[in-house]
Image: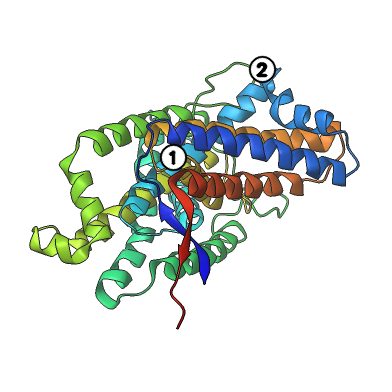
Amino acid sequence: MARLVLVPRETATLLAPLQVAVLALVMTLLGGAVLFVIYGVSPLDGLHAVFVEPLLTRYGIGEVLLKMAPLLLIAQGLAIGFRAQVWNIGAEGQLILGAIAASVLAIRFDGTDSQLLLPAMVVAGMLAGMAWAAIAAWLRTQFNANEILVTFMLTSVALQLLYFLVTGPLKDPMGFNFPQSISFAPNAVFPIILEGTRANASLYIGLAVTLVAVVFVRYSFASYKLSVGGLAPGASFYAGFSSKRAIWVALLVSGGAAGLAGVGEVAGPLGQLQRNISPGYGYAGIIVAVLGGLNPIGILFASAIMALVYVGGDFALLSVGVPDAVTGILQGILLISYLACSLLLTMRLRLVREAPG
């Protein structure tokens, strides 16, 4: 009797991560072409609208940079935890808490001319995201609660808190009963970095976090301890590494990064606290982290590609008339393609013969 099993490849090429990314992108283009045919649209027109049109104008490039900023921040934070086998699925909720904390400061000190307001909002948003993630860290380390479920459920709580605030305590009294806060003052929003677009300086925070992540992952002994603490708690105990500390660090870092992304939204393109802060950046950040191979540089490029898909979906909606669901479908195709290519390039099929009886 014989059966096929997957076994690791004996040798791994240094170009394997690049090969996986290129093959995944090619498969996504092919899958996208099929998708556009299903919608009755020319594949070339559809793919051009998604992957080319946003890069042909200053406005399109600005929108890509705008959406790249939160994706980059969230994915870099999540990747730290994923390396330690700590699965934070609630970055969306931590983003919301960061946005709320920053908005409270912007509203409370509205009308002041202090140039410290925006930096204070950044710090407050980061701390709020960390505090929200700390709930999951405490429940995991004290009661062994599954952080996947806890962080996911905390996102629902964060959403309800946001709805309460924008329809109650933080609602603009002169806003014609819309669920939103007052518009923030100029000293409470990020400056524009590309004239004629909405791209703002929150992208610089994402790039700075990326640089810190590169140094942390490549040159820090703390990164090694974090990985050991998550991958092998028993071994980490004998080595003197704390698995509980790894959980705390992973969740606090990812929560703080998501909180910064929330600040970038309310102090960036929105300029106020609204009911709809994020189009799902917290969940898309998970895809970006995986697509980047949990590598800071890989995540940088993956966030740009995912941002292009976001913006390209809007362009395709206007130019070729496909529904906005195309964005989510393309994201799913990209993730599945990456996982499939990664499996095939790191594993191989082997025929195993078993003795009868």
Q: Left or right? Give the position of 26 relative to 20.
A: right
Q: Left or right? Give the position of 221 relative to 71.
A: left
Give the residue furthest to the bottom. 357
Q: Residue at x 35, y 59 (%)?
A: 86
- The tag earlier along the polypeptide, 1 or 2, is 2
Q: Position of residue 84 (x, y in %)?
A: 30, 54
Res. 314 image quadrant:
top right
Label 2 sits on what residue type?
Arg
**Residue closer to the observer: 182 or 304:** 304
Q: Residue at x 55, y 31 (%)?
A: 304
Give the residue furthest to the front. 356
Q: Position of residue 177 (x, y in %)?
A: 71, 55
Report the disc number at residue 148.
none
Name the residue beneath numbered marker 2. Answer: 58
Q: Position of residue 122 (x, y in %)?
A: 39, 39
Res. 114 image quadrant:
top left
Q: Could you tell me which secondary element the residue under label 2 belongs to? A: helix
Report the disc number at residue 73.
1
Name above or below for residue 269 compared with residue 6: above
Quadrant where the C terminus sits is: bottom left
Q: Residues within 10 Å of mark 2 (few under 14, many from 20)?
A: some
Rounded to the nearest whole Å, what is the CA distance between mark 1 and mark 2?
23 Å
Can see residue 189? no
Q: Are marks 1 and 2 in contact (CB under 8 Å)?
A: no
Q: Residues within 10 Å of mark 1 (few under 14, many from 20)?
A: many
Res. 49 image quadrant:
top right
Q: Residue at x 26, y 70 (%)?
A: 141
Q: Left or right? Give the position of 131 relative to 246.
A: right
Q: Position of residue 58 (x, y in %)?
A: 66, 17
